[in-house]
Image (tube, grey):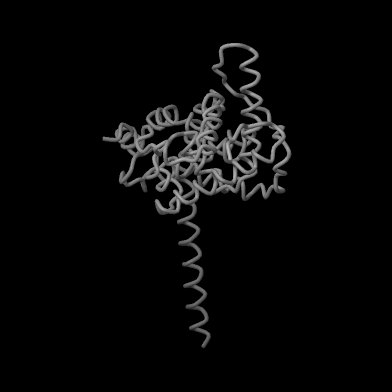
Amino acid sequence: MNDDPTPRDALTPAEMRLREHLEVLRETAPQPDPSLIERVGRATRWQRAVRAPMRAAGMLAAALGEGIGLALGARRGRRR
Amino acid sequence: MDPDRELVARTLAGELAAFERLVERHRDIVFRVVARIVGVEEAEDAAQDAFLRAFHRLDRFRGEGTFRSWLLQISHNAAINALERRRAEPVDPNEESAAPTRAILAQPTPVDRLEARERAQRLTGKLQSLSPAHRTVLVLRDVEGLSYEEIASITEAPLGSVKGRLHRARGELIELLRRNTYDWELPR
């Protein structure tokens, strides 16, 4: 993981001591809830399920908007 | 060869179980990194957010670096966004963190365990009072042990900036700890 270690001699004594303290955090690492995978899995499933219909609905709305715009433009043109 | 490449390809082909394998592989490091940035209480949400962002952007993963670096870059951004949403009041550096720690400790005796937990709690509190940019490089380098190159990729900053930021972050944290009543035995 650590393929580029800072040479110990490049650190001041205080920095070296700080690194030792920070190593304690490595040993006391917070752990995720085991249900995280399940929650992410559930969310990806439903989000993927709604993505295609949402995209289709968005395209339909855009097409409708464009159609209405064109129709209104044509109507205005005829009035003139 | 990045061992995650195949799972990425399978996910893109529609196999959601492959993405779950990626989550399983990287959940610990993603959680640790976001927890150190946003705090343990918000880390579950931020980690979930990071994985979902990665899922939706997976087709943008070009494979120039490793999947882990790419995922950690997204996780870092998700954590920073969570902090911005929170718009927290600045933390008093003299105040210890009251945040509960769900720490997994590997110390031999109960006394050692208690002491290590207390030190970790105090240190976590001090880390929270650094700026997010300083906190991030310190965590990625001195806690997670990542290379400068990987940190540069994750934080989207030049290598020189990462090194400079790390130097300043260490100095800032040392000064904070020196002002603390607890003796951290930091030589002058």
Question: How far across and how far down the image is residue B94, in percent?
Answer: 72, 40
Rendered residue at 47%/72% (across/down): A70
Q: Which residue lies furthest to the left in this view?
A: B1
Tell which of B120 and B43 is nearer to you: B120
Tell which of B181 and A31 is nearer to you: B181
Rendered residue at 45%/53% (across/down): B161
Q: Residue furthest bottom?
A: A80
Q: In which quarter of the image is residue B11?
A: top left
Q: Residue furthest front?
A: B188
Rendered residue at 37%/48% (across/down): B60
Rendered residue at 51%/68% (across/down): A68
Question: How far across and how far down the image is residue B48, in percent?
Answer: 53, 36
Q: Quadrant of residue B70?
A: top left
In the rendered image of this protein, does residue A64 appear above or below residue B87?
below
Counting every numbered tag in the picture gives: 0
Question: How far across and how far down the image is residue B175, in percent?
Answer: 62, 44
Tell which of B173 and A70 is nearer to you: B173
Question: How far across and how far down the image is residue B133, in percent?
Answer: 54, 49
Q: Quadrant of residue B123?
A: top right
The quadrant of the picture occupied by the N terminus of chain B is: top left
In the rendered image of this protein, does residue B158 appear above or below residue B13?
below
Res A32 seen here: no
Tell which of B158 and B186 is nearer to you: B186
Res B115 seen here: yes
The quadrant of the picture occupied by the C terminus of chain B is: top right
